[in-house]
Structure formats: structure tokens, C-alpha cells
Image (cartoon, rainbow, N blue to C red):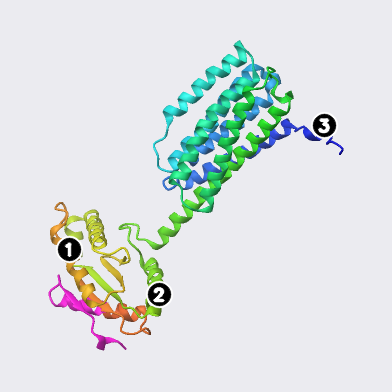
Amino acid sequence: MTPWPAPLLQLDLRTLLLMTIVMSGVMSVVMYSVHRSFRGEVRGLDRWALGLLCVVGAGVSFALNGWAGKIGLLAANMLLFWGVGLSMIGTQEFFARRPGWGLFHGVWLVGGVLTVWWLYLQPHLGARIAAFSLGAFVFYAMQCWLVWRHGLRHFSYCFFGVLVTLQALTVLARLFIALRTDAVTDDVLRNGALVNVFMALASFMSLMLAIAFLMMAMRRLQSILEDRSTHDPLTGVLNRRGFDIFYGKQRVQLGREGRPLSLMSIDLDRFKAINDRYGHVVGDRVLVQIANIISGALRESDYVARFGGEEFVVLLPDAEVPRAMMVADRIRTALRTDWDDQLPPCTVSIGIGTHVSREETLDSLLGRTDAALYRAKENGRDRVELAETAEIR
């Protein structure tokens, strides 16, 4: 069997470095742009962007090795330590963990001392690669633990987890291989197969990991935007759109099984007077407190939504009138016993309605519960009224 020609086994490392510099720079700009747009929602993108800039700087330093000599090599190694370390910090912030700045500084400082020793005092390329591989393994191993411990069971998280695990195993293998090499040359771009493979894997995986992290960030942004479209920004409960979505799902399931479904329309009594007397800031705090009390009185299968202003609607799947009355009494009791003393006291009026047939629409049921709510207001407030079946048209 004819062996492959030697030139085909050699990698053009200068071209590889140029591609790494360009692609890392582009990814850094993309990540920083996303960070600027969603800095409050997704953390860690700025650290990754800065880390990629360090990779760009390391690539430039390697490329200028012949001009800058050992100073360029030292700068390249330090920038690589910072680049990989900053990716760890970014991943920690992404998963809302405390950034390991002590670990970051400890690793690159120790790695820097070892690099100086094996670059200036006792030159040895294999030892330098081993020192860097050990530090990189620590950074990647931390990210492995984070994604497999705190990540979601979603493709983007699993993809990042697989890549960072492979990278951790690769640098660990590189560590042991480098310890066995006798290479002492300082010319990184003209060394043999070991450095070629090292540079190729480092360039490829740094870009793939950045892409995988960005995929996780985009998945989180998607979840945030979906949540914003279905939830009220002030109280955190569902809005009308979110309520319609959950109602549709419950209606199909319960209608197929012939089980009941009830609604509660809840309105704060004299809320305008609270706003006029205490201001809208206090009024907003009252709304948040009301939403928390209502949510605390419900089962996990129940849903509460704010329909605007001071009106809330509660969906009670698989519940008839007695169950709805019990929930209403629990809410009214909690308003007296669990109310924040720093807020003005508040009561609610409640209307309750239950589906009378599978053909009844949501608008019809809401109309009946609203009529019961208005009746509670007319009859003195701070009370519960049931919707009348006769009101169906």
C-alpha cells in the first residue's frame, strides 16, 4: 500500500493561525453584540468575547514568533491561559455561579512561571505544552461540571457539554504526550507532528466551543422572549396571551375526558383610591402582593393571569364550584392574615363560573364570570358570587 506523501501530512500552520485569528475575532464581535443587547438576561457572553480576543492576540503572537522571538511566545502562552480561563468565568456566570477568579489567577500565574522557566532558563517545548495543558484541563473540567450539573436537557446544552468534555480529555491526553517528548526547539511553526496536531485541535475546538456556547445563549434568549410574550412583566403571572394558550391546552384535555373546568374573575376593591392616595409605586406593590397571594392559594395545575389593571383571572382545571369556592375563601383569608403591613389593606371581589357544556367558548365563560364579579361589586364588594347558568346565550 502506497503511503501518503509527506507534504499531505503536514499542516500549513500559518494559514491555520490566520483562520483562527479571523474567525475568533468575528465570533468575539458577535458575542459582544449579543451581550450588549441582552446583558441583563444572558451573562457570560462578554467574558467569552474577551477570551476570544485573547485567542486572537495569541494567534498574532505565534505568527510573529520569528520577529518577536521568546517574548512573542511568552505573550502567546499568557494570552491562551487568559482566553481559556475567561471562557470558564463566562460559563460560571452563565449558570449563575460565583466566578472563580481565584482559580483563574492562580492557574495563569503558576502557568506563567512555568512557561518562563521552560522558555528562558531551561528551554523545553514539551514541558511548556504540558504546563499549558494542565491549566487548560482545570478550566475545561470546571466547565464540564457546570454544564452536566446545571445545564438543561436540551440539544444546545448537551452539544456544549460533549464538546467541552472532549476538549478536557484532549488536553489531558496532550499533557501526558507532551511530558514524553524531547522537543526543545522554540520555533513553534517549524516543529513536528506533535505541535501540528496541537495547533490544529486548539484552533478548531476553540471555535466550536464558542459556537456551542452561543447556541446555549440563544436557547436561553428564546426562552426569555417566549416567557415575556406570555407573562405579565410586573407581577410575573400569565398575561392574556399566555392564559389563552394554557386554557386551550386544558380545554382540549379535559373536554376529551369529560371533566369540569372553572374560572375565577378577581378584581381589587377600590384600587383607584389606593393609587390616588399612595401613588402608583405603592399601587404596583399591591398588585404584586395580590398576585403572590393568589398564586400561593392555587395548585400546581392551576393558572393565574393578569388581564390588565387590577383584574386577575384564575383557571381551575378539573374543578367544580365547591373547589372554586374553597380557593376563593383561601384567597380572601390570606388577604387578611398574610398581607404586608407596609402596604395599605386591600380586599377583592370574586366571580366564579364553570363550563356548562363542551360547546361553551372561553368568551362565554368569561362573560358569565365577569357578570358574577360585577354582581359582587354591586352587593357590597369583598364577597364571592357564582355565575348564573341562565346568563348563557
Q: Residue at x 66, y 19 (%)?
A: 68
Cα separation between marks 2 and 3: 67 Å
Query: For numbered disc 3, what is the local secondary structure?
Result: helix
Q: Earlier in the sequence, mark 2 or mark 1?
A: 2
Q: Amino acid at mark 3?
A: Ala
Residue with the most extreme front position: 1
161 to 87, vertically: above or below: below
* In this picture, residue 129 sits left or right of residue 285: right
Q: Is residue 127 left or right of residue 218?
A: right
Amino acid at circle 1: Ala
Secondary element at image label 2: helix
The range drawn in magenta is: 369-393
Q: Which mark is residue 253?
A: 2
Tell me how far mark 3 sits from mark 1, CA to CA: 86 Å
Q: Quadrant of residue 375?
A: bottom left
Residue 175 location in percent, x, y? 59, 27
Disc number placed over residue 389 in the picture, else none: none
Give the residue number, with chain letter if any, for mark 1: 273
Mark number, residue 6: 3
